[in-house]
Image (cartoon, helix red, strand yellow):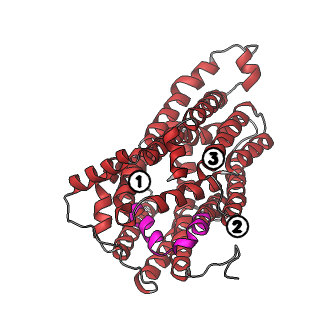
């Protein structure tokens, strides 16, 4: 068994942390899905729901570059426990406001911002923890498992959240979230030992550490250009995320059930891709896999969402758009873990988070604004015999379809531009 693809030697501690943290992620994702539906029902605005994600990502993006050095210095287990406990407290606040009938949209914005602040520290720490718990010969397999767990969460969260919302209420979703968070905290606190990472050679201020991480990225332009590539993709993906609920919940043939099924189909596609990423051998060219996977995703799903008039077409688009993303993520993660020195990973990952994810809140704001203020009014003003109305359909939701048509073209263009970047391809040689 030692030399075949099912060998998981040395991964016991990783499996303990991985399984409990992802159970907690499932609870959090269910709450997020349920609150998106709740907020859209309250306001009927794409921008309103998009701002939930903006508030989560804004502090994360703004402060990540400074938080990485803290993660390198602090005890990894205690840091993750404290961040999980803080997340549980914000979820508890939502539950109390809901039970007293005082929950409002601005409460969710404030609490999401606080959660984003904690994620600023927790995310780079968790990345380093994975590296510390993973033998070098298991890096590719662990990257596949991380994609698998993310896909499983994407698959199960809308199904479970929709079922619980239908049978019970939003409060039950939140209680489940709190229970899974408690399991993760107790496991980290009492059931696993995380090895110490190599300490930085010298103690630096936060600004000095941030500068060092940026200098390292500038000196390693292949990694920097790869991060910028992902930043451009994240801009398009966040516009997609902002527009999707508005279109599916508004169009004829859509609704809450269709949105839940679409999220489930996306999760199934991710799950299948994650299984492939876990079981397939290391590719000859990780860069080629990353570029081709993103090109397939960008050239299919957005186009089918724009042109499709019924749920079946949207489901096919979800499969084509998401099947290869876990394979891309697995190879991207393996490339980063093997290339970046472990003693610098916390701060470099933090700098990466700022550069790669700053486009996400921008994309959410842009997507929500374009749907509400530009695309929907424009489509509503067109005559029924207009070529765009014939192509995309009319009524509420057609503006979001128009936006999907634009981002389909933008996604393909971004992939073709970065595919020609020689610095990214140089990572294969090094």
Q: Are marks 2 and 3 in contact (CB under 8 Å)?
A: no
x and y percent of residue 191 in the render? 46, 86
Mark 2 closeness class: few <14, some 14–19, many ≥20 residues within 10 Å:
some
Disc 1 element: helix
Residue of label 2: 279
Which sits in the foreground, 175 or 181? 181
Residue 325's place in the image compared with 417, above or below, is below
Q: Which stretch did the figure color magenta?
A: 124-145
Distance between the alpha carbons at the discs numbered 3 and 1: 36 Å
User: Which numbered mark, 1 or 2, is in the foreground of this view?
Assistant: 2
Q: Earlier in the sequence, mark 2 or mark 3?
A: 2
Is residue 93 in view?
A: no
Read off the residue under disc 1: 112
Q: How many marks?
A: 3
**Position of residue 212 measured from the top left corner of the image (x, y, whole percent):** 27, 53
Residue at image position (74%, 30%) is 307
153 on left or right of 357: right
Q: Residue at the spot x=42%, y=52% of the render?
A: 108
On whether residue 125 falls in the magenta region, the answer is yes
Q: Residues within 10 Å of mark 1 (few under 14, many from 20)?
A: many
Q: In terms of image quadrants, where is residue 270?
A: bottom right
For numbered disc 3, what is the local secondary structure? helix
Label of residue 288 in the image: 3
311 up-or-down from 347: above or below: above
Q: Nearer the viewer, residue 211 or 106?
A: 211
Q: Earlier in the sequence, mark 3 or mark 1?
A: 1
Residue count near mark 3 (Cα–Cα under 10 Å), binned few <14, some 14–19, many ≥20: some
Q: Looking at the image, is 399 positioned above or below residue 88?
A: above
């Amino acid at each position: 068994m030692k030399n075949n693809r099912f060998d998981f030697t040395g991964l016991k501690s990783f499996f303990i942390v991985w399984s409990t943290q992802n159970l907690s992620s499932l609870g959090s994702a269910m709450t997020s899905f349920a609150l998106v539906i709740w907020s859209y029902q309250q306001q009927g605005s794409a921008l309103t729901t998009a701002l939930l994600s903006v508030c989560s990502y804004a502090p994360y993006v703004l402060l990540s570059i400074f938080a990485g050095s803290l993660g390198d210095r602090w005890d990894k287990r205690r840091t993750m426990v404290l961040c999980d406990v803080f997340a549980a407290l914000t979820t508890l606040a939502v539950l109390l406001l809901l039970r007293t009938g005082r929950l409002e949209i601005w409460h969710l914005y404030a609490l999401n911002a606080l959660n984003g602040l904690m994620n600023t520290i927790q995310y780079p720490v968790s990345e380093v923890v994975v590296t510390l718990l993973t033998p070098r010969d298991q890096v590719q397999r662990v990257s596949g498992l991380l994609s698998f767990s993310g896909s499983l969460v994407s698959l199960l969260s809308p199904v479970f959240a929709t079922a619980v919302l239908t049978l019970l209420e939003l409060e039950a979703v939140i209680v489940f979230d709190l229970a899974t968070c408690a399991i993760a905290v107790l496991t980290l606190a009492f059931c696993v030992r995380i090895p110490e990472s190599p300490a930085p050679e010298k103690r630096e201020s936060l600004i000095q550490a941030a500068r060092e991480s940026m200098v390292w990225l500038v000196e390693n332009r292949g990694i920097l250009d790869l991060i910028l590539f992902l930043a451009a993709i994240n801009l398009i993906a966040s516009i997609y995320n902002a527009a999707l609920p508005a279109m599916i919940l508004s169009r004829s043939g859509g609704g809450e059930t269709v949105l839940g099924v679409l999220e489930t189909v996306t999760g199934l596609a991710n799950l299948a891709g994650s299984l492939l990423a876990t079981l397939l051998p290391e590719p000859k060219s990780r860069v080629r896999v990353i570029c081709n996977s993103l090109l397939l995703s960008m050239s299919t799903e957005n186009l089918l969402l724009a042109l499709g008039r019924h749920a079946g077409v949207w489901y096919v688009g979800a499969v084509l758009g998401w099947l290869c993303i876990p394979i891309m993520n697995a190879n991207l993660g393996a490339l980063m873990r093997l290339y970046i020195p472990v003693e610098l990973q916390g701060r470099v990952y933090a700098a990466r988070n700022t550069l790669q994810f700053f486009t996400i809140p921008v994309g959410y704001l842009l997507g929500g604004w374009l749907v509400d203020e530009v695309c929907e009014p424009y489509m509503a003003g067109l005559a029924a015999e207009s070529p765009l109305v014939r192509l995309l359909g009319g009524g509420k939701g057609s503006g979001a379809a128009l936006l999907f048509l634009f981002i389909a073209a933008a996604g393909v263009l971004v992939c073709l531009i970065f595919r020609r970047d020689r610095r990214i391809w140089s990572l294969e040689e090094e």
